[in-house]
Amino acid sequence: MTIQVDGWFTEEWPGEKSAISLKLVRKLHEEKSRFQRIEVFETETFGKLLTLDGLVMVTDRDNFIYHEMISHPALYTHNNPERVLIVGGGDCGTLREVLKHPEVKTVHMVEIDERVTRVSEMFYPDLTESNGDPRVEFFFEDGIRWVEQAASGSYDVIIVDGSDPEGPAAVLFSEDFFRHCHRVLSASGVMVGQSESPLFHLELIKHYHATAKKVGFQDVASLHFQQCTYPSGWWTVTVAAKDQSVAQFREQDAAKRPFKTRYYTPAIHRAAMAQPAFVEEALK
Amino acid sequence: MTIQVDGWFTEEWPGEKSAISLKLVRKLHEEKSRFQRIEVFETETFGKLLTLDGLVMVTDRDNFIYHEMISHPALYTHNNPERVLIVGGGDCGTLREVLKHPEVKTVHMVEIDERVTRVSEMFYPDLTESNGDPRVEFFFEDGIRWVEQAASGSYDVIIVDGSDPEGPAAVLFSEDFFRHCHRVLSASGVMVGQSESPLFHLELIKHYHATAKKVGFQDVASLHFQQCTYPSGWWTVTVAAKDQSVAQFREQDAAKRPFKTRYYTPAIHRAAMAQPAFVEEALK
């Protein structure tokens, strides 16, 4: 639910009877695409805000944390991530981080709503600065069908950068989808997906782990980080690996990464895998 | 600033043109003490909410994170924390955690506003359950004066569980206060204080580190954690040690802790000390 009153944007966190508000300067853009309502606002202190159906997707101020944490840990978990699939991620912030890795040879970027990408190109030149990289191909299609039809073993890393599991993105958390992801990954493939808030959605995180293990992933771990403008300010991504421990990653390569990060470091990567007592208990 | 509209409590995060809101069931208590306005609300999903001058202090749902993180890391950093001073912390949640440590022989709890403690005893029986412990003495006095007048070397651990540095608690971040804390700590003493949000108050964290080093602490480290109902949802405590590295703590003892925690584990303790790239850069 979204409310705009007296120059404030408010997102009521679904089901949680709590909300975050950002003071607006003005609305920069509004359209109804085939799939959703897309809006861009200029805020007083968070830069530009992109919302889909009234839910915060990106702010200039804090998106770096999410985008770095959904990409670098998974890519440094895989030994040689050459072929990457991104499902969702229309704002292209994840794509930009992925393309910073020199090992990456091809990225298939499968976003159902082309308008999200086009609007992001208009308002987020930084997030979309790598869209012309020759290694990336855009497919504005249903990511679920894409994965169903993809050849077995055709990707090294799959990044699921989708919306909340309420509504159309629910299927991104389904056993069927996970099974296809497992199938289309190469033998040492790694999958990562956004997996919501431990404070608000602990059952979903449990379900994510159980489902990933059920379809055959050898190891699964959730990584915790702060994300001010997402529900509860606490977010996770969950990494699943086909044939290795997720605790193992290319720490030396991460330490010598040939690009700048604002949140990610190898120490943060390791630290993000520490589980608070109540999460550890829930995942036992 | 606080607003109550249509059954919602809203805290506008000072200076940040952003806000958190919690849906209320009803107001349970309101009074004006000598120092501040104290209110208690029943919320729909965060249990009871305690506010001081309209700012969130405690909710039933998420206070465990803050209270565990401001107490256990500091106590496990000290080799034998027998004598503890708590400055502030009137809700007694920190006191409860401190008293779980069998090494602790005496706690001086110095809170300026007795009414905060009395109101907490009325509405938070869990947080105040240890108030009758014979090891604790309450002093409803100015913590700054207390530290100024305390004998040198008289405490092993000082916990500064105060309000934001705007307003009367500003002096808790002053060089003079830090110098007295250093003086009243024993040779291997450890100090910890709440140190706000890296996203919103990075300059304050830099100032905290610089001041602690200036007055003679050998090592200083900020520990990061999620705190949904505090500004930005991201909070820190900063630990300063007189004669050791803060990275060293009694990890074996923490692993065999004779009490239950919901957030803290030794792995979380270590992980919380990992610095995001932009924080590491700022603290260089």
Image (cartoon, coloured by chain):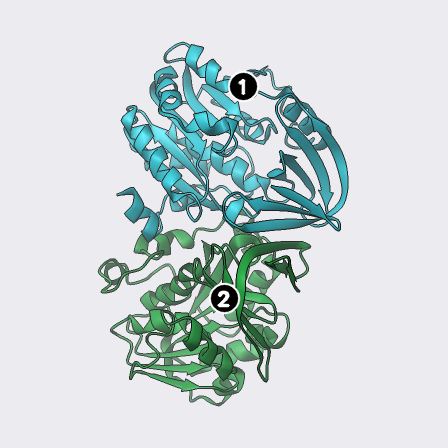
Chain colours: A green, B cyan
Q: Residue A258 appears in which quarter of the rendering? A: bottom left
Q: B200 left or right of B189?
A: right
Give the amino acid at mark 1.
Val
- Location of residue B144 in the rendering, given as x and y in whole percent from the top left corner: 47, 18
For mark 2, what is the residue? A194
Secondary element under disc 2, as helix, strand or loop, is strand
Secondary element under disc 1, as helix, strand or loop, is strand
**Residue pictured at 55% horizontal, 34% vertical:** B259
Residue B117 visible in the picture: yes
Q: Residue A270 appears in which quarter of the rendering? A: bottom left
**Residue pictured at 32% horizontal, 76% vertical:** A130
Q: Nearer the viewer, residue A20 or B256?
A: A20
Subunit of mark 1?
A: B
Crowd rating for badge 2 (residues with CA inside 10 Å; few <14, some 14–19, many 20+): many
- Location of residue A84 in the rendering, given as x and y in whole percent from the top left corner: 36, 78
- Is A196 located above or below residue B125 in the figure? below
- Is A244 located above or below residue B205 in the figure? below
Q: Nearer the viewer, residue A104 or A61?
A: A61
Subunit of mark 2?
A: A
**Residue pictured at 30% horizontal, 24% vertical:** B215
- Is A100 located above or below residue A34 in the figure? above
Give the amino acid at mark 2.
Gln
For mark 1, what is the residue? B110
Quadrant position of the C terminus of chain B in the picture: top left
**Residue pictured at 66% horizontal, 33% vertical:** B126
